[in-house]
Image (cartoon, rainbow, N blue to C red):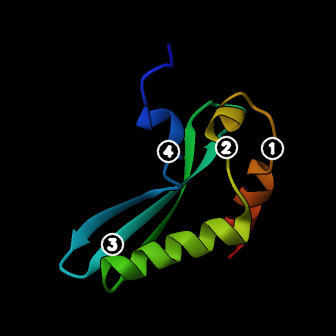
């Protein structure tokens, strides 16, 4: 017998968060991994003025430009691109 369809196993995790902060103001947060010394989560935060679509475009562009960030690998301390992505996002 085949296992039941599980949508959660098939769909990818979101690349970041978009939070409405005002009438036309959105906060875009991208997880960068964990700080190796303290274990605290690190995020890139950016306020985007405009529509939610503008915020989504910024999020998509930032993730594509910096490569995928794998939260599980970053949580385990493996570099897996998270250190490179952190440097790129913080410098730009």
- Number of the label disc, if any, that sits on residue 26: 3
Whichever of callouts 2 and 3 sits on the residue coming sooner in the sequence is 3
Residue linked to disc 1: 80
Residue linked to disc 2: 70
Measure the C-alpha gap from mark 3 to mark 1.
Answer: 29 Å
Whichever of callouts 3 and 1 sits on the residue coming sooner in the sequence is 3
Mark 2 lies on a secondary structure that is loop
Measure the C-alpha gap from mark 2 to mark 3.
Answer: 24 Å
Instruction: Tell me whether the residue at label 3 lies in contact with that at label 1, contact meaning CB atoms closer than 8 angstroms.
Output: no
Residue linked to disc 4: 11
Measure the C-alpha gap from mark 2 to mark 4.
Answer: 15 Å
Mark 3 lies on a secondary structure that is strand
Mark 4 or mark 1, whichever is nearer to me? 4
**x%, y% of residue 38?**
63, 31
Residue at the image position 71 percent from the left and 31 percent from the top: 37
Q: Nearer the viewer, residue 62 or 90?
A: 62
Mark 3 or mark 4, whichever is nearer to me? 4
Measure the C-alpha gap from mark 3 to mark 4.
Answer: 25 Å
Measure the C-alpha gap from mark 2 to mark 1.
Answer: 7 Å
């Amino acid at each position: 017998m085949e296992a039941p369809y599980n949508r959660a196993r098939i769909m990818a995790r979101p690349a970041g968060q978009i939070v409405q902060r005002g009438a036309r103001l959105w906060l875009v947060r991208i997880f960068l991994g964990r700080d190796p010394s303290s274990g605290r989560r690190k995020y890139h935060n950016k306020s985007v003025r405009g529509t939610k679509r503008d915020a989504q475009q910024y999020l998509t562009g930032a993730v594509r430009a910096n490569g995928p960030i794998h939260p599980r690998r970053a949580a385990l301390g493996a570099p897996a691109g998270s250190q490179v992505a952190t440097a790129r996002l913080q410098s730009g």
